[in-house]
């Protein structure tokens, strides 16, 4: 009996000790829902999809930092903060358990808004370099050029206001996108009170170019635009100078600008006194810069036709051909400029193309969405760029049009070929997406899942 009692006491002691032991710790998975309420430290933050904005700037603008406590609500708020900046089309925030348990590994996947515009300062007591230098220190997303969204224009205007206040010159600032040449725009910042707009423009001193041609050229960009001397001189350089350079007049000078109040509207009329200068012939055509050793290839691509008088319309067309050719060869970030050397004694202008190719991008892999197995196979056989070959910039759009025009798939709606450009590895992967417009009268072909 005594041994039975001892056994029972031992059993109860063991059970009590077991009850006091902590339960085995389970590794926490974070996928939203109830898990989002748990708050742990952030182990790491990474960014994907950005081509222009730096990782560090995006993380700073999100408000997150390694080591801070966070949960699902924190990540949602960070995503909303990035979207509210106006710099991004889309922002996704993902988080999962980190190696240090408990903790989060956070990643942002972003798509940046393009195009970007250079900034202009008008009628403010600071220069563009001053504004750029300050904004780069004050705004983690500012790189020197900005998208034209209302949020970014307002964000940049507030930054300029803070800089003016720090200089003891406070005033309110407004930003807007303005036209400086056909298909060329800039983000202009000026006093909120504004300056007078341009109503009419007249010219004096022109002989080689007719009044009507000058009037039509300046009308495309100047009428209704805020007037300042510096802003208007830019418009003259972009609009009027090319009319003269097309005919070899390389030394046109805008001598004087005069403004008078317009009689009908609250604006100003601008009178321009110009000096046309002599006409120049085309001299040598060459290549400078990092691709000088490929001069023959560049000039063959430029396809410069013979000309006596220097026609810079044709030279600019050649410049475009060189840029397109470089992008076809995988230099997706290629830019090109043109240097001019004027011999005033002989009235000759020598022209040099200066290509800056940047890195060469290679094709990686092709993914096809929206088709069944047979359709995927057929599309991949049609694709003409092999993995590891230079990636032609225009090929995705060309391929999508070709697939649609071939008529291989019934009821085909939209076809998109979307390149994923990795600026670090210089690899481009492409996804071709098929969408269908199905009707009850016609069955889709073999490629539809």
Image (tube, grey):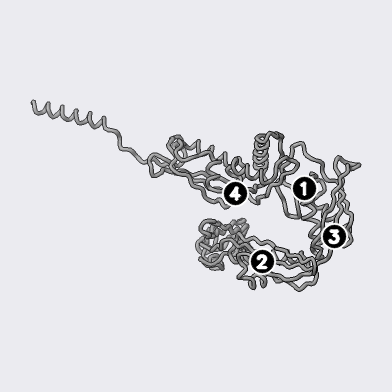
Whether pointer 3 and pointer 2 mark residues with C-beta atoms closer than 8 Å, the reply is: no
Q: Residues within 10 Å of mark 1 (few under 14, many from 20)?
A: few
Quadrant in which residue 126 is drawn: top right
- Left or right of residue 343, residue 131 in this image: left
Vertical side of 247 occupied by 142: above or below: above
Select label 4 or label 3 by which is in front. Answer: 3
Q: Earlier in the sequence, mark 3 or mark 1?
A: 1
Image coordinates for residue 46, horizontal then vertical, percent: 49, 47
Select label 2 or label 4 by which is in front. Answer: 2
Q: Residues within 10 Å of mark 2 (few under 14, many from 20)?
A: many
State the residue position of label 3: 276
Task: Tell me the distance, in whole angstroms, between the alpha carbons under discs 2 and 4.
Answer: 27 Å
State the residue position of label 4: 112
Q: Earlier in the sequence, mark 1 or mark 2?
A: 1
Q: Earlier in the sequence, mark 3 or mark 2?
A: 3
Select label 3 or label 2 by which is in front. Answer: 3
Q: Earlier in the sequence, mark 1 or mark 4?
A: 4
Q: Which mark is residue 25?
A: none
Q: Residues within 10 Å of mark 3 (few under 14, many from 20)?
A: some
Vertical side of 400 occupied by 56: above or below: above
235 or 64: nearer the viewer:
235
Image coordinates for residue 111, horizontal then vertical, percent: 58, 49
State the residue position of label 2: 322
Image coordinates for residue 371, horizontal then vertical, percent: 54, 59
Image coordinates for residue 385, horizontal then vertical, percent: 55, 67
Seen from this angle, which residue lies furthest right?
263
Q: Callout 3: helix, strand or loop?
A: loop
Q: Which mark is residue 230?
A: 1
Q: Is residue 400 visible?
A: no
Q: Callout 4: helix, strand or loop?
A: strand
Indicate the quadrant containing the N terminus: top left, top right, bottom left or bottom right: top left
Task: Tell me the distance, in whole angstroms, between the alpha carbons under discs 1 and 4.
Answer: 31 Å
């Amino acid at each position: 009996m005594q041994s039975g009692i001892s056994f029972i006491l031992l059993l109860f002691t063991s059970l009590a000790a077991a009850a006091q032991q902590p339960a085995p710790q389970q590794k926490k998975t974070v996928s939203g829902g109830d898990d989002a309420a748990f708050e742990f430290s952030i182990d790491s933050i990474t960014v994907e999809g950005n081509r222009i904005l730096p990782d560090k700037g995006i993380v700073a603008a999100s408000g997150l930092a390694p080591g801070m406590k966070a949960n699902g609500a924190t990540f949602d708020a960070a995503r909303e903060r990035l979207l509210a900046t106006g710099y991004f089309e889309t922002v996704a925030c993902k988080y999962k358990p980190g190696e240090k348990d408990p903790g989060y590994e956070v990643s942002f996947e972003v798509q940046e808004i393009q195009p970007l515009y250079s900034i202009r300062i008008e009628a403010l007591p600071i220069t563009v370099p001053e504004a750029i230098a300050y904004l780069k220190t004050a705004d983690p997303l500012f790189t020197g050029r900005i998208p034209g969204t209302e949020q970014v224009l307002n964000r940049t205007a507030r930054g300029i206001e803070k800089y003016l206040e720090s200089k003891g010159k406070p005033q309110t600032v407004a930003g807007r996108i303005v036209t400086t040449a056909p298909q060329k725009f800039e983000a202009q910042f000026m006093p909120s009170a504004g300056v007078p707009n341009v109503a009419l423009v007249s010219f004096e001193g022109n002989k080689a170019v007719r009044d009507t041609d000058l009037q039509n050229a300046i009308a495309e960009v100047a009428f209704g635009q805020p007037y300042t001397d510096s802003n208007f001189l830019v418009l003259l350089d972009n609009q009027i100078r090319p009319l003269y350079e097309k005919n070899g007049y390389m030394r046109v000078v805008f001598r004087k600008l005069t403004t008078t109040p317009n009689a009908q509207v609250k604006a100003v009329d601008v009178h321009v006194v110009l000096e046309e200068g002599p006409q120049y012939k085309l001299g040598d055509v060459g290549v400078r810069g990092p691709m000088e050793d490929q001069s023959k290839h560049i000039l063959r691509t430029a396809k410069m036709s013979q000309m006596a008088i220097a026609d810079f319309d044709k030279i600019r067309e050649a410049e475009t051909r060189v840029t397109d050719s470089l992008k076809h060869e995988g230099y997706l970030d290629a830019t090109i400029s043109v240097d001019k050397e004027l011999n005033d004694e002989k009235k000759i202008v020598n022209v040099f193309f200066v290509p800056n190719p940047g890195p060469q991008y290679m094709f990686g892999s092709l993914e096809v969405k929206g088709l069944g197995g047979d359709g995927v196979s057929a599309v991949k056989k049609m694709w003409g760029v092999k993995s590891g070959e230079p990636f032609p910039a225009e090929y995705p759009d060309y391929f999508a049009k070709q697939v649609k025009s071939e008529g291989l798939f019934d009821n085909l709606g939209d076809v998109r070929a979307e390149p994923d450009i990795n600026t670090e590895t210089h690899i481009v992967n492409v996804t071709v997406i098929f969408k269908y417009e199905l009707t009850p009268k016609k069955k889709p072909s073999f490629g539809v899942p």
